[in-house]
Image (cartoon, helix red, strand yellow):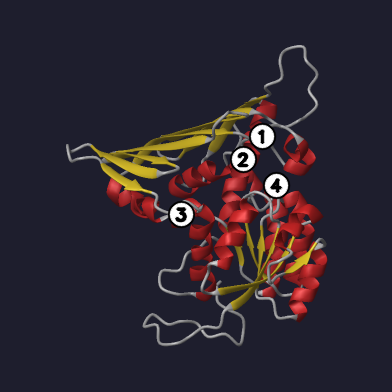
């Protein structure tokens, strides 16, 4: 689907000859990454932020002096926003909080940009996609690593690194098991889905859908102690791809400091991706390359990509929801494998 502005707005062509009206946007969810989205949307030259919503009145009170309409009820923001000509809804909520409002936006003809993960499992994701497809609406999902300039070499990984035969991701988060994170019905999963999603997405996007997934999950509860949550604190996942290629993912939550690292070993060089840089170690003796991340606010990079995708300017990004179904399928296969103690195929969830 070609992503572009709604009728009544002109696209900028590659020469920059045409002008585009600022598109009316709203944001639901002001906690965590929502605060970063708020700052990034406000600084955008293409989006006019007209309303925000959060279910907690104490959070909204912080914006009493802003020239924004504020809502405690997400449904009211969407319905009233549609009457005012809302073009795009930014969603910074967890799937269990957001799904009914994302469905409402689709029904009302409003495009959506959703943080990751946008769904708890493949079937939930498919259900949402059908509704946007039926309306011919863009449903965009964040993919920060794909649009971060320092990670640009990943777009041509096969050319620069050669055949990637081994990869590994290691993720540590500060999140615990409190609240929704410890409730599998609401969270959909523990640290794999709600901690290591971005790194799993990177591996699946770069290497393709694995043929099989084998995983083990564990809880940090001390032996003999009662466990009052049912999501995993730690996970180990082995991915087997075609052509004798393999990747591993280890993830753990509850650490004092967050960190992550993805290593990609290719015929020509090894590539290491960290939160603040990408390094390439060449096998022909050339000096190591280091590409540092310049933008502190990751949301600014994501919002810039949304501008490109939604307005179809030069080098449009493609952070679409459909591309994320494979990642959800891999994580769903991992959870099944942890129960069956056997390798599972992600393709069974995509059929």
* Numbered disc in front, either 3 or 4: 3
Query: Of all residues shown, which one is farthest toward the left?
Result: 285
Q: CA distance from mark 3 to mark 4?
A: 21 Å
Q: Nearer the viewer, residue 193 or 290?
A: 290
On screen, 260 above or below 329? Answer: above
Instruction: Please report contact status of discs 3 and 1: CB closer than 8 Å, yes or no.
Output: no
CA distance for labels 4 and 1: 12 Å
Eyeballing the image, is 300 above or below 238? below
Is mark 3 in CB contact (under 8 Å) with mark 4? no
The numbered mark, 2 or 4, whose residue comes first in the sequence reads: 4
Front disc: 4 or 1: 4
Earlier sequence position, callout 2 versus callout 3:
3
Question: How far, Cα to Cα, is label 1 from label 2?
Answer: 6 Å
Residue under numbered circle 3 = 146
Residue 135 falls in which quadrant of the image? Answer: bottom right
User: What kind of element bears circle 2?
Assistant: helix
Question: Which residue occupies 48% across, 46% down?
Answer: 202
13 or 62: nearer the eye? 62
What mark, if any, has residue 335 been given in the picture? 1
Q: Earlier in the sequence, mark 3 or mark 1?
A: 3
Label 4 near label 2: C-beta < 8 Å?
A: no
The answer to whether marks 1 and 2 mark residues whose Cβ atoms lie closer than 8 Å is yes
Residue that carries the numbered disc 2 in the rendered image: 331
Q: Residues within 10 Å of mark 2 (few under 14, many from 20)?
A: many
Residue 82 image point, x, y percent: 75, 77
Residue shown at 39%/56% (left/top)?
A: 149
Query: Which element type, helix, strand or loop, lies under badge 3?
Result: helix
């Amino acid at each position: 689907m070609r992503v572009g502005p709604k009728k009544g707005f002109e696209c900028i062509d590659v020469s920059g000859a045409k002008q585009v009206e600022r598109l009316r946007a709203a944001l639901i969810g002001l906690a965590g990454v929502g605060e970063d989205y708020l700052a990034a949307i406000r600084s955008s030259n293409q989006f006019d932020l007209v309303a925000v919503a959060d279910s907690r009145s104490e959070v909204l009170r912080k914006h009493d002096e802003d020239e924004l309409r504020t809502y405690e009820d997400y449904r009211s923001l969407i319905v009233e926003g549609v009457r005012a000509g809302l073009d795009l809804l930014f969603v910074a909520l967890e799937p269990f909080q957001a799904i009914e409002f994302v469905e409402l936006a689709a029904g009302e003809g409003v495009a959506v940009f959703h943080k990751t993960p946008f769904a708890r499992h493949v079937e939930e994701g498919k259900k949402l996609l059908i509704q946007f497809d039926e309306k011919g609406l863009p449903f965009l999902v964040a993919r920060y690593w794909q649009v971060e300039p320092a990670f640009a070499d990943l777009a041509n990984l096969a050319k620069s690194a050669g055949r990637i035969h081994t990869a590994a991701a290691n993720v540590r988060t500060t999140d615990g098991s409190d609240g929704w994170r410890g409730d599998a019905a609401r969270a959909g999963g523990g640290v794999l889905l709600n901690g290591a999603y971005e790194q799993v997405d990177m591996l699946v996007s770069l290497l393709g859908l694995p043929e099989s997934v084998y995983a083990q999950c564990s809880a940090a509860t001390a032996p003999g102690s009662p466990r009052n949550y049912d999501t995993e604190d730690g996970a180990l996942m082995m991915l087997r791809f075609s052509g004798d290629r393999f990747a591993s993912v280890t993830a753990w939550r509850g650490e004092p400091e967050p960190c992550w690292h993805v290593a990609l070993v290719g015929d020509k060089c090894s590539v290491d991706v960290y939160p603040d840089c990408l390094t390439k170690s060449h096998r022909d003796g050339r000096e190591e390359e280091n590409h540092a991340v310049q933008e502190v606010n990751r949301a600014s990079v994501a919002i810039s990509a949304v501008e490109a995708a939604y307005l179809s300017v030069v080098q449009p990004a493609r952070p679409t929801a459909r591309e994320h179904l494979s990642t959800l399928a891999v994580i769903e296969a991992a959870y099944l494998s942890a129960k069956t103690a056997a390798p599972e195929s992600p393709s069974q969830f995509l059929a």
